[in-house]
């Protein structure tokens, strides 16, 4: 017999979703980063023995094209810690700040093969791989930083509660025609979300760097 029930973690995720700031953080290097999102507790019974297991929120399967026209999927990132965000190259508001701050993260870990950065364009019709490549070159992005293009519906869906706890949508009323949050999402090698940070606040980005290092050190 199989029974399931769900409950939502409180604290970190609502803060990240609605305020766009760092959730649970600490200077204690012995701390454990939480796994954010819904948990599904599974109870299985066999031969009168009941066992409980916990299934955690994880990033859904995806397959996008990067700035070098290579496919990037979950399998390519399996076992890697990565930071993800959403942007578009013609963004007139927060994207330049986010890219500048993300570059600090990229440079800090540019020689770390267990780490990657994935930036999803929310304007795939314009931001073709060649446009993304030019953007990456002008920014001076290290090789570990992938700029990816995918169908709008897939990108917008994975940005939200089903994926990265961020937000992205097409919005004619918004500057540049798109609306999105300015958060960076930290994902571990199993596809679990371990932190959400403001990508426009350098203090928050510094915490992201500390948390990335924490996950690397615990491997």
Image: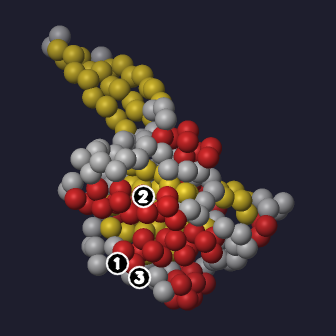
Tell us which disc is closer to us: 2 or 3: 2
Q: Upstream in the sequence, badge 1 or badge 3?
A: 1
Q: Is residue 64 left or right of residue 32?
A: right
In 3D space, how far apart are the residues under numbered discs 2 and 3 (Cα atoms)? 21 Å
**Where is residue 160 shown, x and y percent of the image?**
58, 49
For the point 34% across and 35% down, which residue is it? 55
In 3D space, how far apart are the residues under numbered discs 1 and 3 (Cα atoms)? 6 Å
Q: Upstream in the sequence, badge 2 or badge 1?
A: 1
Q: Name, please, the residue furthest toward the top.
A: 48
**Where is residue 200 shown, x and y percent of the image?**
59, 64
Q: Secondary structure at mark 1?
A: loop
**Where is residue 42 shown, x and y percent of the image?**
33, 25
Placement of the N terminus among the 4 image quadrants: top left
Residue 197 against residue 113 in the figure, above or below:
above
Q: Upstream in the sequence, badge 2 or badge 3?
A: 3
For the point 55% across and 89% down, which residue is it? 138
Q: Work out whether residue 123 can be spotted.
A: no
Q: Residues within 10 Å of mark 2 (few under 14, many from 20)?
A: some
State the residue position of label 3. Answer: 142
Q: Residues within 10 Å of mark 3 (few under 14, many from 20)?
A: some
State the residue position of label 2. Answer: 207
Specify the quadrant of the image occupied by residue 171: bottom right
For the point 27% across and 28% down, which residue is it? 53
Q: Work out whether residue 183 can be spotted.
A: yes
Residue 43 against residue 67 in the figure, above or below:
above
In 3D space, how far apart are the residues under numbered discs 2 and 1 (Cα atoms)? 18 Å
Q: Secondary structure at mark 3?
A: loop
State the residue position of label 1. Answer: 110
């Amino acid at each position: 017999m199989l029974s399931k029930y769900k409950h939502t973690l409180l604290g970190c995720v609502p803060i990240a979703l609605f305020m766009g700031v760092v959730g649970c953080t600490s200077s204690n290097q012995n701390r454990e980063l939480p796994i954010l999102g819904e948990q599904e507790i599974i109870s299985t019974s066999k031969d009168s023995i009941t066992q409980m297991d916990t299934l955690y929120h994880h990033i859904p399967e995806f397959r996008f094209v990067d700035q070098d026209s290579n496919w990037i999927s979950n399998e390519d990132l399996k076992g890697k810690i990565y930071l993800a965000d959403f942007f578009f190259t013609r963004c007139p508001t927060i994207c330049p700040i986010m890219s500048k701050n993300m570059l600090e993260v990229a440079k800090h870990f540019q020689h770390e093969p267990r780490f990657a950065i994935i930036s999803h364009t929310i304007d795939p019709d314009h931001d073709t791989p060649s446009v993304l490549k030019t953007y990456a070159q002008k920014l001076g992005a290290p090789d570990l930083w992938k700029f990816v293009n995918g169908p709008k519906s897939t990108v917008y869906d994975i940005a939200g509660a089903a994926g990265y706890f961020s937000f992205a949508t097409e919005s004619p009323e918004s500057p540049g025609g798109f609306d999105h949050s300015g958060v960076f999402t930290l994902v571990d090698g199993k596809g679990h979300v371990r932190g959400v940070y403001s990508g426009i606040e350098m203090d928050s980005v510094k915490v992201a760097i500390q948390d990335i290092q924490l996950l690397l050190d615990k491997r």
